[in-house]
Amino acid sequence: MSAGATSAHSVVESKAVGKWIAGLLVMAYALVAVVPLAWIFSTGFKSPPDSISYPPKVIFEPSLEGYVNLFTNRSRQTPEYIESLGTATTWYDDIVRKRNMVITGPSRFKDRYVNSVVIGFGSTFLAVFLGTLAAYGFSRFRVPLKDDLMFFILSTRMMPPIAVAIPIFLMYRTLGLSDTILGMILLYTAVNVSLAVWLLKGFMDEIPREYEEAAVVDGYTRLQAFIKVVLPQARAGIAATAIFCLIFAWNEYAFALLLTSGNAQTAPPFIPIIIGEGGLDWPAVAAGTTLFLLPIVFFTVLLRNQLLRGITFGAVRK
Amino acid sequence: MTDRAAISIADRAATATPAQLARRVRGLSDRAIAWLFIAPTIVLLLAINIFPLIWTVYLSFTNYRANRPGRAVDWVGTRNYERLLGSEDVWGYLQATAHFVSWTMSIQVVLGLGLALLINKNFKGAGFWTTIILIPMMLSPAVVGTFWTYLYQPQTGIFSYIINAFADVGPVDMIGSPTLAPWSIIIVDTWMWTPYIMLLSLAGLRSIPDYLYEAAEIDRANAWQKFWYITLPRVLPFLMLAVLFRGIENFKMFDLVVELTSGGPGSITELASINLKREAFEKWRTGYSSAFAVILFVTVFGLGNIYVKALNRVKQ
């Protein structure tokens, strides 16, 4: 081929022009992919009229109305009544009164968000705890039917959530677990434990057995060797696994929609039903979406080098 | 003092005996530890996955309705299955699912592999842009579906606005129009999941050793030949793995589409899982929907089996 092939550099290195074009194309795709996210983020800071103006407003006067609406319940009042209240004492009262409304109390968004956090962390802790033990068992010991058990564990993850939701609904109704935080934690643990076992087995397989064997020779029991030698070595893997479990539990929707209503509902089924007057209150929905997605964006960036492993159940490593 | 002496004697005894025996002397045997460690996971999965599954299979042969727990449950044999397989509507839902799965997979493979080939050129800032591209993949599909309904608003949405900036077609009603609705879900799924295919293709590309290309260079292979005879065969297992995994996930697709179109207009985008939810939790035909669940599960399980075999091949 041309000069590139005969140059002293590796022939595999792309030519400068090719690199430039590749870079521009990838950048273009990334920018297009980011538009929906940027749009939803900015909509959170629009006023309701700005959010439904045409043509869509790229430049607008920022407002916190969406966030105020997200966290409060409001009722419409006559201008005379608003007048009679005197001047607003807080900035959020002020925003709401400009729309002839008064705040009647906090909305349920905070509770739903807290539920998401509690259920997410609870199920992640349990799944990683169980998963670490099982992964160590599968990684280090001769277990009869090991491959079948591992496949069984993975296959539970393949089930369509709606298909198992029917009997789980009936089971939870009988046991009194419907719409409880404990019920959701158990359920998400069961879904996540398969991921945790597969990922952690991969991480454990990478820790040389010699460390434990040395520890056992030094007088540790197998259990002590596990706790004092293997666990510290697996720390990074355990952390990455925990984040993957947390993201799954955080994002889960089908079970939350079908099995919870008032008490244990998480944020995903709640965000779509933040209704304002005359349809959806888009800035409030956008504000809720932003608050809900930001932690995940943060974790994705944090985990970028482990992502491949997480999404393939540990099969493909970098 | 005596304690320490005792331990050191035990120690000496243990190191003197073969390793296997020594471990047994000190506390739990390996076998006991293995089972103690694995059992809780298996028990949890049996209780929350397998037991419900068996229950579903049982219910699929009955006329049980979950909203009337008091009523007597009759065994109806295979009637639910006969009804399902004989129903034209059910084939319609399966067709909608097949349309969704095949289009999302084909578009995403082309885009994902293309992006991976570009990123593999290792231009400056490739890592940064890759990370940006990956973000949609990790987000909550239900929440993503909700905010795309906003972007898709025909009168005021930015999607319609951008289309009109290129072609003056008037308001584009992606969700309300029967011809466009299937594409509305395909577009959002592609936006979310192209990064998945890209990431796996990239892993495949990076697994190809440089010397293969160097050898091809010596043989005067052109760029196309290099792609066809070196790159593609090496990336294919990764690509197949990605397609299989995403195919299964899209076959089960529920959350994104529920919030985006909720199966509408009519039942144009009513995928299998969405119809299942309607039958089970709105019409409360528990027996009938259990039979549907069993059919879906058998399909997914079959695909899952292939998936694991593919996983093992990629691993080698």
Image (tube, coloured by chain):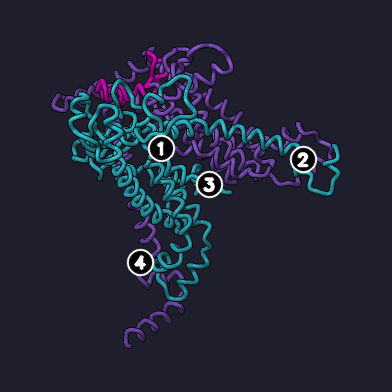
Chain colours: A cyan, B purple
Q: Which residue is mark 3?
A: A304
Q: Residue at x 59, y 30 (%)?
A: B109
Q: Which residue is mark 2?
A: A15
The span picked out in magenta is: B262-291
Q: Earlier in the sequence, mark 1 or mark 2?
A: 2
Tell me the amino acid under the disc marked 2.
Lys
Q: Badge 3: few (under 14), some or many (20 or more) residues near its Cα, within 10 Å?
A: some
Distance Cα–Cα, label 2 vs label 4: 61 Å
Distance Cα–Cα, label 1 vs label 2: 41 Å
Task: Pinpoint residue A132: horizontal percent, then vertical percent.
Answer: 40, 55
Q: Chain of mark 4?
A: B
Determine if residue A80 is in view: yes
Up the image or down, B50 lies above or below B162; here it is below
Q: Earlier in the sequence, mark 3 or mark 2?
A: 2
Q: Earlier in the sequence, mark 3 or mark 1?
A: 1
Q: Which residue is mark 4?
A: B28
Task: Pinpoint residue B214: horizontal percent, then vertical percent.
Answer: 79, 44
Q: Chain of mark 1?
A: A
User: Is A6 positioned to the left or the right of B100 in the image?
Assistant: right
Picture quarter containing residue A153?
top left
Q: Residue at x 35, y 66 (%)?
A: B28
Tell me the amino acid under the disc marked 4.
Leu
Distance Cα–Cα, label 4 vs label 1: 50 Å
